[in-house]
Amino acid sequence: VDESRAARLLAYIVLQGVTTRDAEVASEAVTHGIGRNSYAEVLEHLKEQQEKGRATTLLTGNVLPMVSHLGRTLGCTVVGTEVEQHKDRYTGHVRGEVCVGDEKRARHQESLPLIKDLHIVGVGNSMYDVPFLEASTSSFVVRPSSRLRRLATARGWDLSLSGVRARSQQLVLPDAPAKGGLLAILFAAYRSLEFNAVVLYLSLFLGAAWNAGYFLAGLP
């Protein structure tokens, strides 16, 4: 599946006519959904880098309204695919280019601070991440495909996160009270909303917003 086309389709199906407020509630549900199938070792790696004082960015091809809450929860700046907005509703149309491939690398570089000898640690899990991994000082790959594993081996990238397994854990904002179960959130937040919201949830739960990498910027 072409990730760029998939992102445009996702944006239109799940965000066309949806208010910014409703999208934010859905974004919170996405965070809880991802927490049910996340990689503890990868999250620990992220936390360790943050404790070293490094700036962290979630770099993703996914539409920004759906991953904004995840970024805040992880303590990361988010760089992703932007969606057009008219007043307080999203149009469902992508603004500019989808943040994948060479576009992801370009936005990665644009977001970096102007510091000499900047050390970049890149973490990715798909071939769409290769351009920005190539632009990183140190690169890690997570559960790579056979093609990505071969490339990572040839480039000398770190494979220590290649065998991680997903397991359920709760992701919450720092100092935020724990929420109820995912279904409780869904029905409590969306019982009175229009059909678009239901489509949005169904699409996200199929995993459309789960593929993201991150990179960490800091001094060596």
Image (cartoon, grey):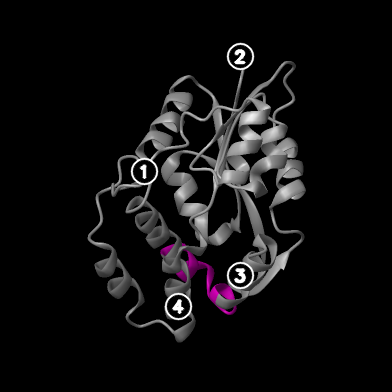
Res. 147 visible in picture:
yes
Vertical order, 99 against 183 (above or below): above
Q: Mark 2 vs mark 1: give the one in front.
A: 1
- Residue at image location 52% in from the left, 30% down from the top: 159
Q: Is residue 181 left or right of residue 61?
A: left
Name the residue tied to disc 1: 165
| In magenta stretch: residue 2 | no
The residue labelled by disc 3 is 11
Residue 177 in percent (x, y) is at: 25, 49
Question: In 3D space, how far apart are the residues under numbered discs 1 and 4 (Cα atoms)?
Answer: 31 Å
User: Front-most of 56 and 152?
Assistant: 152
Nearer to the camera, 37 or 19: 37
Q: Quadrant of the N terminus?
A: bottom right
Using the image as rendered, state which of residue 165 and residue 194 is in the foreground: 165
Between the residue at mark 3 and the residue at mark 2, the CA separation in whole angstroms equals: 38 Å
Q: Earlier in the sequence, mark 2 or mark 4?
A: 4
Q: Does the CB distance between marks 4 and 3 fall below 8 Å?
A: no
Question: Which residue is tagged 4?
Answer: 197
Marks 1/3 in contact by CB < 8 Å: the verdict is no
The segment highlighted magenta reads: 14-25
| Callout 1 crowding tier (Cα within 10 Å): few <14, some 14–19, many ≥20 | some
Are the residues tagged 1 and 4 within 8 Å (C-beta)? Answer: no
x then y, percent, for residue 96: 77, 60
Q: Which element carries disc 3, helix, strand or loop?
A: helix
Mark 3 neighbour class, 10 Å CA radius: few under 14, some 14 to 19, many 20 or more: many
Q: Tell me which residue sits at (35%, 56%) in the image.
A: 32
Measure how far apart labels 4 and 3 are at the Cα level. 13 Å
Residue 58 place in picture, x, y as percent: 56, 43
Identify the mark nearer the N-term, 2 or 1: 1
Who comes first in sequence, dot 1 or dot 4? 1
